Amino acid sequence: MIVQPAALALIVAALLTGFMVLYAGWYGVRILLHWDMRSGSELQLSLERRTYLISAIVNFALICQLLSLLLFIYTADALHSLFIGAMCAAGTLHVNGFGYPVLALKIVNFLLAGLWLIINYADTQGYDYPLIRVKYSLLLAMVPLVLLESFCLIAYFAGLQADVITSCCGSLFSLDRPGIGGDLAGLPDRSMAIAFYCNMAATAACGIIFLVKKRGGYLFAALSSMGFISAIAALVSFFCLYFYELPTHHCPFCILQSQYGYVGYLLYGCLLGGGVAGLGVGALMPLRGRGSMAAVIPVLQRQLMAAALVLYLIFTLVVSWPVIFSSFKLL
Amino acid sequence: MSGLLARHRNIIDFALSSLLRRKAKNISLLAVYTLIVIIIASCMLFINALKQEAAAVLKDAPDMVVQKMVAGRHDLMPVSRGEVIGGITGVRGVTARLWGYYYDAVTRANYTLTVSDGGQPAPGSIYIGSAIARLTGFSQGDLMPLRTYKGESKLLQVVRVLPAEAEIVSADLIVLSEKDFRELFNFPAGFATDLAVSAGNPLELATIAAKIVHQFPDTRPIMKSEMLRTYDSIFDWRGGMIVVMFAVAVLAFIIFAWDKASGLSAEERREIGILKSIGWETADVLLLKFWEGAIISLTAFLCGATVAYCHVFFFSASLFEHALKGWAVLYPQFRLAPSINAYQLTILFFLTVVPYTAATIIPSWRSATVDPDSSMR
């Protein structure tokens, strides 16, 4: 067990969000079962009042969730000095079996939380609770994931013992290592970069077509999700090499460190923000016709699309910068 | 956009005036909240500053120290082994170090005696640390008596008092010549306290250590990185334990905040009732409650963090320095290098503001859903 202020802060946040999401989920079930807008019964009135509480709780829990992803990555990076052989977050997360599952769950929950906040925002803009069932169904899907994440996070910190020998990022992301890390690093670097640029260009074109002709929302969501994945793959297999100026170093975590100007936070921030906004556009597509949403959702979709495009553009510019201007060249 | 901003600004205005109307209640809440932030922030800042000091001190430490062990205890190291270790591939240099401790019965303090490799004082003369000079009153040119192993007094002339800036490393230090050191302790010739090994490439240290242990199984190599890691984990652990100890205080504060937020006075209920009857919606009242909480949290957080900063860096964390630093008669008086970063502030935010906000959500919702009709009656 590592007793350290950052670990304690993350555990407190995990317990609080777990508890809150569970509480909200319980009322979510009641709302899904008993919600009836036409009824004026006491139960319906109390449920309508309750929706304010649930919104507030879930908003709070999910914003905590978003912040705790950043705190978790930074902490994993900061703790690497306690473990022999760990040079960055890659080594720290590998100390026990819960590290990478926590990270994966945190990213999935980050995306789902962002999506929920977008749908909730749209719902509160209407007067007739148009998205209430969608919103609470999504919430129920998130409850087990958030609880699992809280459990894994506590198990991860409970299982950390300083000085355990771990593989460092150099070996974890080297080419001959089996597993997802090695697979990502082993992707052909140039073709990944070309796929990434094509994907980004297609996303941008599709976004502009949507903004002008108001068509192609699903395509945009699909392209931006693919863009999210191809950006991560291209970052690990190609762009990282330019940041580190080393032809063999594929670690996606070292760019979070101070010697690279914390550029990783900007990159991952843009990517996650763009991913959420892009998914949000797609998730809102089937809901456009519901009640008062016809006036709300198209405006919101345009804003989300613009946000996704700007964030992806920043990402693309930042990763392309060292490729163009660095003296390091891959032959 | 400007409409949205104006709405928030008006609600913040209203929140401020409503907080000021209930001064006594809010000031007591703010005071307890600030105190909690001060305690946790001081602890975190202090631990971080100590870690940085340790890292700064160890920066000049040798890459690896090799000690000889006898029956699980640290023993004298034959200097001849240094030559063998020097022959291992990758080793750049081996230095035999002479150092030890000296207990001074008069001042009841322990001094660290060391023979420096470069710039040794001439036999018969010594350099002393500034804390020793302060404690004993000796200054440059005085003769300082040290008791030898036979119990006789040996007079050594203080030729230099080490500068106070380096106090964290040199407070209790006496630098003397090799001849005086061996005479003082009857230290056998051909032996040293331990060996300092440096390597051209720090990545090879682990291999070098393995080779040394293979060649001399009764030795213990300690790497600089291991020392750093140990300091880091000890300081982290101490800081974490203090936070755990104060968790009870945080819990008490959360209950206090919950109680304050749910105990609505008749006047407050009436106020919310009036707001709702003139057209405020539940969401607006919730927003008002959110801003009230945010104003209190932000004020407590900023005040607490500022006071903690002053406490740690201007007053050397006098509240819990003994629990965190350890204690000794000759303790270096050092001012910690001020440092604060966004990471620490985020942790502090998670340990204080997040639990407070979580505790006040349900009471805020209760007060926001008050029925206007019943509350005004």
Image (spheres, coloured by chain):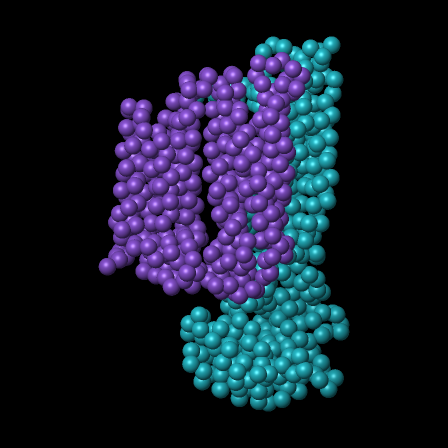
Chain colours: A purple, B cyan
Q: Which residue extends farthest left?
A: A331
Relative to the observer, which residue lies in front, B45 or A311?
A311
**Which of A183 and B241 lies nearest the eye of the viewer?**
A183
- Could you tell me which residue is drawn at 51 percent across and 68 percent down? B60
Residue B351 shows in the view: no
- The extreme front residue here reads A33
Is residue B143 shown above or below B282? below
Q: Residue at x 51, y 58 (%)?
A: A94
| Residue at the image point whose x is 62% and y is 13% from the top | A40
A41 left or right of A63 in image: right
Q: Which image quadrant: the C terminus of chain B? A: top right
Residue A121 location in percent, x, y? 49, 26
Residue at point 70%, 69% (across, down): B136
**Residue B58 in the image: x percent, y percent?**
54, 66
**In the picture provided, is B28 more to the left or to the right than B337?**
right
- Do we see residue B114 in this rendering? yes
In the image, residue A330 sits, relative to residue B14, either above or below, namely below
* Residue A268, position as x, y percentages in the image: 42, 44
Residue A196 picture location, percent across and down: 30, 45
Q: Is residue B282 above or below residue A256?
A: above
Determine whether, in the image, residue B177 is placed left or right of residue A104.
right
Q: Nearer the viewer, residue B50 or A265?
A: A265
Q: Taking B348 as reference, is B146 left or right?
A: right
| B335, A43: nearer the viewer | A43
Quarter of the image with the N terminus of chain B is top left
